[in-house]
Image: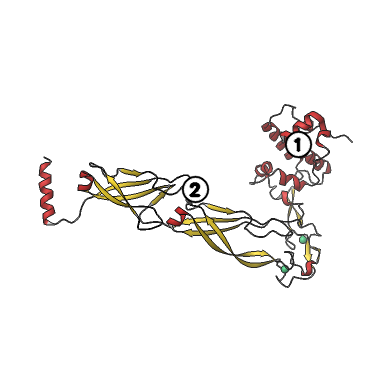
Amino acid sequence: MSKPDYYEVLEVSREVTTVELKKAYRKKALEYHPDRNPDNPDAEERFKLCAEAYSVLSDPQKRQMYDRFGHAGLGGAGGFGDVGDIFSQFQDIFGDLFGGGGFGFGGFGRRRRDPNAPTRGADIRTDVSLSFREAAFGTTRQIDLSHPSPCEACSGTGAKDGELESCHTCGGRGQVARAQGAFVLTTTCPTCHGRGSAAKEACDQCDGAGQVDSERIVKVNVPAGVDTGQSLRLSGRGQEGTRGGPAGDLYVTVHVERDEDFEREGFDLIHRLVVTYPQAALGAKVDVPALEEDEDAVQTIKVPSGTQNGETLVVRGAGVPRLNGRGRGDLICVVEVVVPKKLTREQKRLLRELDGTFE
Ligand SMILES: [Zn+2]
Ligand SMILES: [Zn+2]
């Protein structure tokens, strides 16, 4: 049996652009979607064929081979045996097409996936609190993690000696169907949670749960320059996978403590610099805190004569080290000229005298 032409399958011209192609495929996929054509094997075949055509034509290399040599150029590869594969491969298309409500097809993609296939471990999220300087200069932290892990004794199956039998509720399919209006909705089997199998006898290490609480310590290298709300991703340090699947990732969200001298704005530091009226008027050299590992470090800056309240004095490169390792931000001192609330008799006399000179 000869295969139909991929361009004809999607009803597009041979010069079709990527955008038009995607549009055409979405239209076809919607038309032949199995949930819209229940118990219609022709539609399902059509649906698979459209996906196959799209997977070839949306790949520039494959499309070129196909244009030159036809189906023979693809070496007989491609084709989808399982509708679930289509959903997992074209998630970006189906994500906005069927997800987010509106059609009620959500969850279809998981319907026929093998529930006993290797599964990637879950991602784990945790938080870490850092002092202002730890965040600025980077640090290393040991984080205690406590979370469920797949039970080693039963490889996460929950069955003693790994002995399983077909689930009685769903007959091993892992899904149960129920009619709702015009649609047949399938949901994960409540008895076996989609596995399709049940333990003959519960594993005594985990009481049949398939997972145990595990505790471990993970070393986290925090790079210099991190700020509140940023997450560090530690690839493969999440929950273990089951049945040989890869581990998930660990995400560590950073919280940085406040500092009394500085406020952060990206990699710049804002410092409120209080000066007296004579200092502002005459100019002065004043000490301001410096961001160093030593909390008491100071640096001397020059306040020019005639500095006004609210003016900023910038010290280049005295801010927070940049995350990419390229230098530091700036220290921005915002000048605040204070008016004294209490004065000695002598100070009052001098100020009056000064005041007289301005008239
Ligand atoms: Zn177990
Ligand atoms: Zn079941």
How packed is label 2: few (under 14 Cα within 10 Å), some, or many (20 or more)?
some
Please give left or right for residue 320 compared with residue 338 in the image: right
Say which mark, if any, is on residue 227.
none
Please give left or right for residue 333 compared with residue 342 in the image: right
Residue in view at x 73 percent, y 34 percent = 61
Q: Position of residue 3 (x, y in %)?
A: 85, 35
Tag 2: amino acid: Leu
According to the picture, the residue beneath numbered tag 2 turns out to be: 323
| Ligand number 1: quarter of image | bottom right
Q: Position of residue 56 (x, y in %)?
A: 76, 36
Residue in view at x 69 percent, y 58 percent = 241
Residue in view at x 54 percent, y 56 percent = 221
Q: Quadrant of the N terminus?
A: top right
Q: Quadrant of the C terminus?
A: top left
Label located before the other in sequence (1 or 2):
1
Q: Position of residue 309 (x, y in %)?
A: 26, 45
- Which quadrant of the view contains residue 96? top right
> Which structural element holds mark 1?
helix
- Which quadrant of the view contains residue 75? top right
